[in-house]
Amino acid sequence: MMEIKRIYLENFLSHEKSDIKFKPGINVIIGHNGAGKSSIIDAIYFSLFRDPVRKINQDDLIRKGSKEAKVELDVEINGKTYQITRLIKGSITDTISEIFPNGYKTLARGAKEVDATVYKLINADEEIFSSTLFIAQGKIEEIFDNISKIMDKILRIERMNELRETNGPIHQLIKEVDNELKYLEGEKERYKIIEQRINDNKKRIEEDQKQLQEITERVKRIQEDIQKKKTEITQLEDKKAKVEALFQNKLSIQKEIQEIEEKLRQLPGLLGEKENLETKVKDEELLNNKLNAIKEAKALISSIKQTSQFLDNLIKQLNSKKSDLEEKKRLEDKERIYQELNRKKMELENVENEYTRLTSILENIKRNIEEKKRRLSEMKIINDEELKTKLESLNEELERKRKEKEEITSKKSEVEGEIKQLVSIKNNLHSLESVSKCPVCGRDLSAHERSKIYQELSEKIEQLSKQKLELNKQYLSLSDYINSLQSTIMQLQSQILSLQKLKGEYENLKQELEKLEKQKADYEEKVKNYQPAHEEYVRVKDQLKELEDYHNRYLKVSRVSENEIEDLEREIAEKEKQKAEDTEKLSQILNEFELPNDNKKLLEIEKQIENKITEIQNLKRKLEDVKARLAVLQNEKLRKTALENELKNVEEEISTIKFDVAYYQKLKEEVEKMNDEYNRLSVEMGKLEGEIKALQSTIDNDLKELEEIKKKVEKEKKLIDAKKNLEGLREILSEKKLQAYIKNNAKTSIENNLITILSKFDLTYRALELNFEQGGKGKNKASAIVVYNDKGDEVPVNALSGGERTSIAIALRLAIAKSLMRDSGVLIMDEPTVNLDEYRRRELIDIIRSSLEIVHQIILVTHEEELMEAGDYVLKLEKKGGISKVEVVSNDQQVV
Amino acid sequence: MRILHVSDTHLGKRQYDKDFREEDIYDTFRQIIDIAIKERVDAVIHTGDFFDKNEPPNKAILVALKELKRLKEKEIPLIAIAGDHDSPKRGSSIFPQRILEEEGLLILLDHQNNYYKLNDVEIFGISHVPLTGVKVLKEKLEKMKPSSRKSILMLHQGVNPLLPYQYSYQLEVSDLPKGFGIITLGHFHDRIKHVLNGGTLVEVAGSPDIISVAELEGYQKNKKGVTVIDYSTSEPSIHYINTDIRPQLEVTINTNNLEKEVESLIIRLTSLINGNTKKPILHITLEGTPRKKNEIVNKLRDLSKVSEYYRIAKDNTSYIDETKNNPKVSPTSSLDEMIMDYLVKVARYTESNAKLVLSILKEENEDEVYKLLRKFAGLD
């Protein structure tokens, strides 16, 4: 079963980007003409077959202004979901993929491969689909008119005939095979000719090879001779090279000896210079000793000075420490007393704290008592008896006035009643002018009497109104008075209340005061007990204050001790000893080098000596230089002797080697001649070998060709078989064989399906018969279907009612689909109600609904709102700004 | 407490577009009312497709009014839900049951009002919901919590795999709520009884008459009728009561022996009619070699004596002589399969050659045809 799940259109016809989902059941796509609803069907069709439904160019399917279009179809086939993507002019190729819950697998790429895969999946081609399940605008019944043509097409009968035709491909191929067989005869002839050529060429190769053999032997001999002579030449060339090398050596030695003799002429001058310099540098050591003595003397003078300063410092320290120690001894007694007092103070501190706490509580209580007394004195107590009596009398007054008010009220309503009655009588009198009866007593009245009564009534009403006004005034003043009385009473009541409250407060204060007096006495007693200890504490504190000064001074000197003074004295003695030693050493040095005991003069002498030493050092460096040059010349002398020996050896060696130049030249010429001969022979050999190779390749080619011809000839049997096969196929595809078989079987199957489907439409005939061979034209054309009515009479389909015809047409389409496609399931209808009247439309809706028992999804495109009621799922299409927009309209108000 | 479960009465259905079939359906409905009164049930529940169409013929409404009045006189209440056939297809329309409700003849449970208390038995019911509203339906079912097992749920839906009504089921068995003593279903026309995990009984009463040919098999096996649900204990028990409907038979006639076969069939049927008040409907399958249809139809006329109606339901006659070893085609073969059958079994082609011929027939590109032909001929 196939179900269309979703179609996506991108720049396809009037759609920019539309993503449309479908459901099982009846899907109605509704919209005005040109809203782009048929485009959705076009897209489904294009997705499946890559063919436009309408007869237009593929490129015209692209939305105006866009460069490429894309459609994407999600379709479920036997429980698996596939996605087919088709592109027009797109950069990507068509694909079909199987969709899994968590991914997809591409099954094919490229338009052709996708077509083939779709065909395999739905098991039907475009032809069957477009003649059955796909119903174009207003063409439901078209199937009756063209059934033989349609059946020929979808049963592929047409195709079979095309294949069989005299110009058809099978016949063409048979002709081709015949031509090929003729060609093979020619090839057989050619085979013989080539065989002869091969034999001739083989003979020529044999001759060439003999000649080649002879030349090769001669070349071998020459090569051996050349080799011998070349060995001799190599030996001679060795000797020649050795002699040449020795001559070179001899020349270079002689040159070097000459150079050394030139250098040795400088020797006597250098020796004189050396002696002169050596005498000049002898004084250096003496000067160095004196310089060292000066440096030592300078150090000693500075050390003595430092030691003296340090000593002065130490003596000052010693004196101060001695005086501190004396002070410490004087203060020690007073310090002891201070410590004693301090300890006592600490002992008393706890008691003192308790004393302070108690006194502070006591102060608090006293302050509290003062406050309460003050408040008591401020309170004034007024007697409330007087107020109560006044309240009582006021209440009585109020009661009286209220009664008075009631009386006035009742009097007022009496007057009002009377006025009302009189007014009504007066009105009656007025309205019933024609009636001449007294409205009060009923007796007859004259006009005069009536006017008199009218007059009297008016006067009486006026009088009563005045009385009413007076009463109102009294009533109002009485109300005011009552109100003021009420507010006075309320004020009095609240005064009495606050007085009672004040009284309660006064009593409370009195009680609290008594309690506080009692507490005060208690605390006074406690404080009295602590009084002596407190006095003692104050006394000790005063004494400590007096001693404070002495204590601080003692703290300053307390750290000085006798030991410290002894250590200081020992250090002074050591430093003085060191100073004496340094002075002694200094005078010794000064005497030895006859130097003055004066730092400035010493510095002057030091500078003179340093200058002299610098001068001597310069001379010393010159001396070193002269010595080095002398050493070099000494080496050159030794080198000269060695070279003279070497020269003698080389001359001896040259004389021992013997080399004959003439013999060497002769050998060389002989070898050259032999090489020329060798080259000549090589060229000849090359020629022969080339010729043999060429001959061999000709033979090889010929052999190959023979092989090929052999193969071709072998195909002869195959070709004969092929011819037989093709002729057989032509026979099988003929009307009497496969065509008849298919027609008969398809007919039976379709008829049976048709019967079943029609009974589901509640249309049943006794029997019915399909007629694929219509023959004739126009009215003479045989009916596609003949039904048998209840009486058993034949009725051609065209004689049936419109509703029946539509039913049979749809049933026939479904039956064909069911018979020829394994997986039908979707019925697609484009504007099926076009040209139908109201009654037929309603019939069609019923038929469509019944079709749901055969296919489980129907997609219906219409512009008629009425068809919405047939839909389980409704899509509305509108064109906005030239672009089609899709909106889903559910049809289940029941649930929503 | 005993309750009669009735479903799919399809009043107004005109099978084969025949008056007598419409009458048959009304008669079956009258029988059901008789059963309810005779059995003295406490109530009747109807699980949808009361009428065959949302706008039923006047006659159907009249029958319903008359019969339900009889029920009302006996003070037997009728609680109903609507089925897909009852459902209006446009928003402003209403269920035809509303007419009966207005007369006080039934209580219709719909999508808003889905609860009715019948003494100590709780009844929940939701009228048919199409596939597009399934989400809401499932939410409603999830919220349904009966207070005890003395409870009935009424639905008119396809339930997979219990009622796989074509492909158009809306619910899975697992979507059915727990806790009910019994779930009564309409929509599927065969009788089914099934126990869910958790002990809830699922009961399909089926249609009380044969509404479609597809029901013939179920009818032969289980008959047709209504179901009595007995709730006298805390768990429900059920038993069937059959309706007396017009028999429908599937018969086979061989065209090679047409006259004799028809005669023997007439004899067979005559004895059947004697024990039965209603003449049967015959669904004829033809076998043997094909003959002119009008010849066959003429001969079959004799069957009018023993049947109310007959029709050729299936023509299995074969144009190809079976003695020549031509294969019979299975009725489910696709065109490709037919072609393959012929090429392999008759023309004695190898499987691969047959497939080649098939692709040659489908190929439109001449170059491709040429290539395929060469391959078939054995040239490539």
Image (cartoon, coloured by chain):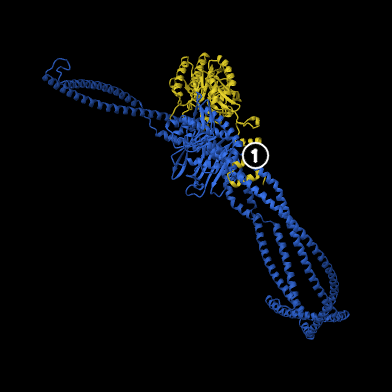
Residue located at (40% from left, 34% from top): A377
The chain carrying label 1 is B
Q: Position of residue B233 (x, y in %)?
A: 57, 17
User: Is B275 positioned to the left or the right of A330 in the image?
Assistant: left
Residue shown at the point (67%, 44%) measured from the top left: A722
Residue ranking furthest to the right: A656
**Vertical order, B121 against A494 (above or below):** above
In the image shown, does A709 or B2 lie closer to the viewer? A709
Q: Position of residue A288 (x, y in %)?
A: 75, 77
Res A280 seen here: yes
Q: Percent x, y for residue A286?
A: 76, 79
**Left or right of B287 on screen, residue A873:** left
Q: Nearer the viewer, residue B364 or A627?
A: B364
Secondary element at tag 1: helix
Q: How busy is the neighbourhood of tag 1: few (under 14 within 10 Å), some, or many (20 plus)?
A: many
Quarter of the rendering containing residue A570: bottom right
Colour-to-chain, yellow: B
Q: Nearer the viewer, residue A468 or B207?
A: B207
- Whole-percent x, y for residue B193 in the image: 59, 22
Residue bearing mark 1? B354
Q: Is residue B58 above or below residue A237?
A: above
The amino acid type found where label 1 is placed reads Ala
Q: Which chain is blue?
A: A
Can residue A892 be seen by looking at this rendering? no
* Quadrant into which the N terminus of chain A falls: top right
Q: Nearer the viewer, residue B143 or B91?
A: B91
